[in-house]
Amino acid sequence: MKTNNPYMIKKKDLMLILAILTIGIILLLIFKFAFKNGNTVTVSVNNKVIASYPLSEDRRQVFYLDDNSYNELLIENNTVRIITADCPDLLCVKQYKINRCGETIVCLPHKLVVEIISK
Amino acid sequence: MNTKKLSVLSMLLALALIFGYIEALIPIYLGVPGAKLGLPNAIILLTMFFYGPKEAFIINIARILLTGFLFTNMFSIIYSLSGGLLSICIMHVFMKYTTFSITAISAIGGTVHNIGQFLMALFVLKTIGIISYLPFLIIVGCAMGIILGVLVTLLIPVTSKLIKQGGTS
């Protein structure tokens, strides 16, 4: 293995790891402060917007898709999330609530995208 | 390729499958539906250390397809493929031309794996909204890489005799 020992963690390794983590943290801070809070929620299926609601009004809405499958949306406290659905993986339900411009919740099996925009 | 090498590689593939199964059991949502932690990268790294990038590619593609059809879905396959192949490329470059330790290379590999998944998600979903998850993907990828890197560093002395006996020609 040449003259270096690939097992021992040396200073350059720690520097590299620190560099990666620093980039990650810097990006985190940029995204946290650069994106404003949006005021409108749009729901799109197959890239076509089918509904749009203001974020400020609490609302509970079920969206039925062509083949009778559904996603249920909950808007409260100026955030939005999907609370129930009948897609096989339920990843959209497990997703955290969103409130910032550009943030999205995606239900891949239903091709449904919930997005926050600013009107 | 002799039979001994074939059997060692098959064993590594089976190990990668098991790691992939455990990975599929852990529900972690990083904004990209279908994104995974990257546990089998430990086995891929091991393969790269003992054999090389070619064998690592083969094992990675094989286990991604098998894991995808057995435990997860089509999107996981696409994301894992893009993440894993990019990761192997970058890891090989670092392994061959620099003198970083296994742990650091694994950290790089883990980060690149997640960045690869993110880029593929950008391509598939066509929305820029998921970019807010990029910092988490980088940090978690790096952390997972470090953990797996330490694991592989500890595993190499233990397994080297077994693998060398299997033949590396």
Image (cartoon, coloured by chain):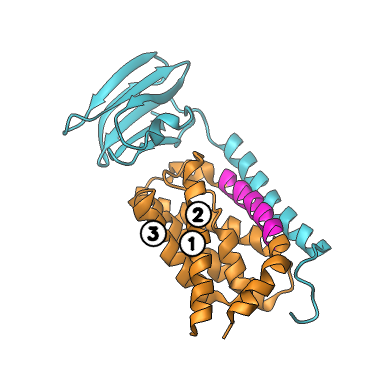
Chain colours: A cyan, B orange
Q: Which residues are magenta?
A: B135-152
Residue B135 visible in the shown view: yes
Q: Residue at x 78, y 58 (%)?
A: A14
Marks 3 and 1 share the same chain:
yes
Mark 2 residue element? helix
Label 1: how many Cα within 10 Å (few below 14, some 14–19, many 20+)? some
Q: Residue at x 63, y 50 (%)?
A: B144
| Amino acid found under the numbered disc labelled 1 | Ala
Q: Amino acid at mark 3?
A: Leu
Please tell me whether mark 3 sits on a helix, a strand or a loop: helix
Query: Looking at the picture, does residue A26 appear above or below residue B66?
Result: above
Q: Amino acid at mark 2?
A: Ile
* Residues beneath discs 3 and 2 located on the same chain: yes
Q: Is residue B48 above or below residue B119?
A: below
Within the magenta stretch, is there residue B83?
no
The CA distance from mark 2 to mark 1 is 6 Å
Mark 2 touching mark 1, by CB under 8 A?
yes
Chain identifier of the residue bearing label 1 in the image:
B
Which disc number belongs to residue B66? 3
- For mark 1, what is the residue? B14
Chain under callout 2: B
Q: Are marks 2 and 1 on the same chain?
A: yes
Do tag 3 and tag 2 residues touch (Cβ < 8 Å)?
Answer: no
Which residue does the numbered mark 2 point to in the structure image? B18
